[in-house]
């Protein structure tokens, strides 16, 4: 994931309203969202190169999402796959805060990341560039390739657009996904600065990214209502194209007994 907007416990009908774009090199092999064959309890897309995922949810209500923290001057090689941070949470049975506490001693082994982990009761955020576990309080948040709610152009723009849609009693999934398909490029004075060339920073500045080799692979929307019913919709885009395939999943969370 490279751009996330989420509204937590701040809507009369929904515990969570989550939307995100996943950006990656087009050549990196990836599957669309599906129930994993090695554990049918997990619904997520999958990175076929490293085996992890960028976001997903389990049938018992464990939810997670990941973005990279962009710092080209501090790349560790080799380093463990960040996508396994999300996969391991979905596979396991730990409470979200306990999972992050166990991750803390190893967090510096990874290249920079932002990680959301939660369930129907609690949601937490952790970045190995901040090294503290934050419990998410009710509200609307944005996350890209820096710390939570860093006011990058794309983060601010997404939150503003999302705020209007979630004022509705029944937000439209189609409208939420359409918000993510925004190719507007800011002026250079509003482009984020992360240590890449200006050409790359400009290319990465819009909500929806298109270039010859790198861009937005998919857009996702996950809504969890107060009856624990889940709606998961994914649009998977063809490289360098406006064309997409869409799939939709629904289920009711079956919480594990304590």
Image: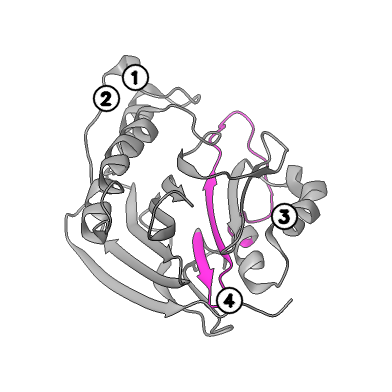
Residue at numbered disc 2:
186
**Relative side of 187 to 193, left or right:** left
Would residue 258 be seen by someone viewing this image from the given angle? Answer: yes
Q: Residue furthest left?
A: 242
Q: Earlier in the sequence, mark 2 or mark 4?
A: 4
- CA–CA distance in space, label 3 to label 1: 35 Å
Q: Characterize the local packing of mark 3: few (<14), some (14-19) or many (20 or more) Cα atoms within 10 angstroms.
A: some
x 27%, y 59%: residue: 170
Disc 3 or disc 2, which is closer to the eye? 3
**Relative side of 149 to 235, left or right:** right
Task: Give SS at disc 4.
Answer: loop
- CA–CA distance in space, label 1 to label 2: 6 Å
Residue nearest the viewer, comparing 1 with 64: 64
Q: Characterize the local packing of mark 1: few (<14), some (14-19) or many (20 or more) Cα atoms within 10 angstroms.
A: some
Magenta extent: 55-84
Q: How far across and how far down the image is residue 144, in percent? A: 46, 39
The answer to whether the residue labelled 1 contacts the one labelled 2, judged by CB atoms less than 8 Å apart, is yes
- CA–CA distance in space, label 4 to label 3: 16 Å
Residue at numbered disc 4:
60
Based on the picture, tell me whether residue 71 belongs to the magenta stretch.
Answer: yes
Disc 3 or disc 1, which is closer to the eye? 3
Answer above or below: position of 221 versus 153. Answer: below
The answer to whether the residue labelled 4 contacts the one labelled 3, judged by CB atoms less than 8 Å apart, is no
Residue at numbered disc 3:
97
């Amino acid at each position: 994931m490279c751009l996330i907007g989420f509204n937590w416990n701040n809507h009369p009908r929904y515990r969570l309203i989550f939307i995100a774009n996943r950006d990656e090199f087009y050549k990196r092999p990836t599957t669309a969202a599906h129930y994993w064959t090695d554990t049918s309890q997990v619904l997520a897309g999958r990175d076929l190169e490293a085996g992890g995922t960028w976001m997903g949810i389990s049938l018992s209500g464990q939810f997670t999402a990941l973005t990279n923290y962009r710092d080209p001057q501090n790349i560790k090689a080799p380093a463990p796959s960040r996508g396994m941070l999300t996969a391991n949470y979905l596979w396991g049975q730990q409470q979200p805060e306990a999972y992050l506490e166990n991750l803390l001693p190893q967090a510096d082994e990874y290249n920079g990341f932002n990680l959301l982990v939660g369930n129907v009761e609690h949601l937490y955020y952790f970045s190995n560039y901040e090294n503290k576990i934050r419990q998410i309080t009710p509200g609307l948040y944005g996350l890209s390739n820096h710390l939570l709610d860093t006011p990058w152009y794309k983060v601010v723009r997404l939150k503003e657009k999302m705020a209007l849609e979630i004022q509705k009693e029944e937000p439209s999934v189609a409208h939420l996904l359409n918000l993510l398909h925004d190719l507007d490029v800011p002026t250079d004075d509003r482009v984020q600065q992360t240590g890449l060339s200006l050409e790359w920073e400009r290319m990465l500045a819009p909500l929806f990214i298109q270039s010859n080799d790198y861009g937005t692979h998919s857009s996702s929307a996950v809504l969890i209502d107060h009856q624990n019913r889940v709606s998961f919709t994914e649009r998977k885009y063809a490289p360098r194209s406006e064309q997409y395939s869409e799939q939709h999943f629904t289920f009711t969370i079956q919480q594990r007994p304590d």
